[in-house]
């Protein structure tokens, strides 16, 4: 019984810590943007990534974390593609 309660408590208290990774994603976008031009990205691609990064941060600030992650992952796909 103690193991079941411990497992439930563990799940309840650890899930929120991993649920939203918006700050990590826009941090990764920021780091990749520093070398985007050297990596062969065009000015239009860099401009699009910066726009997506700003939209993703705005969505995060407004509490829409799922949308933020979707937008930021689009920016990362451009940078890594």
Image (cartoon, helix red, strand yellow):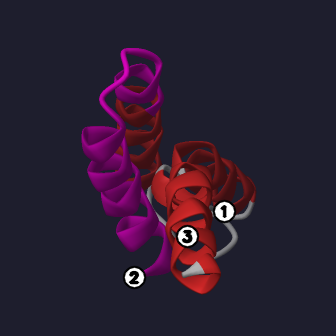
Q: Residues within 10 Å of mark 3 (few under 14, many from 20)?
A: few
Residue placed at 30% from the left, 29% from the top?
64
- Location of residue 18 in the rendering, given as x and y in whole percent from the top left corner: 56, 60
Foreground pick, 43 / 77: 77
Q: Secondary structure at mark 3?
A: helix
Question: Of the residues under marks 2 and 3, which one precedes in the sequence?
Answer: 3
Residue furthest front as drawn: 1
Question: Of the residues under marks 2 and 1, which one precedes in the sequence?
Answer: 1
Q: Which residue is mark 3?
A: 5
Residue 64 appears left or right of 30: left
- Location of residue 59 in the rendering, given as x and y in whole percent from the top left corner: 34, 26
Q: Which residue is mark 2?
A: 81
| Residue 40 visible somewhere in the drawing | no
| Residue 21 visible somewhere in the drawing | yes
Q: Is residue 23 above or below residue 5?
A: above
Foreground pick, 56 / 45: 56
Residue range highlighted in magenta:
57-81
Residue placed at 42% from the left, 48% from the top?
49
Q: Nearer the viewer, mark 1 or mark 3?
A: 3
Q: Which residue is mark 1?
A: 32
Residue 46 appears left or right of 18: left
């Amino acid at each position: 019984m103690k193991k079941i309660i411990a497992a439930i408590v563990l799940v309840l208290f650890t899930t929120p810590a991993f649920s939203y990774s918006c700050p990590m994603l826009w941090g990764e976008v920021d780091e990749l943007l520093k070398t985007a031009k050297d990596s062969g990205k065009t000015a239009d691609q860099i401009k699009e990534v910066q726009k997506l990064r700003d939209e993703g941060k705005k969505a995060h600030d407004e509490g829409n974390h799922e949308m933020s992650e979707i937008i930021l992952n689009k920016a990362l796909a451009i940078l890594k593609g």
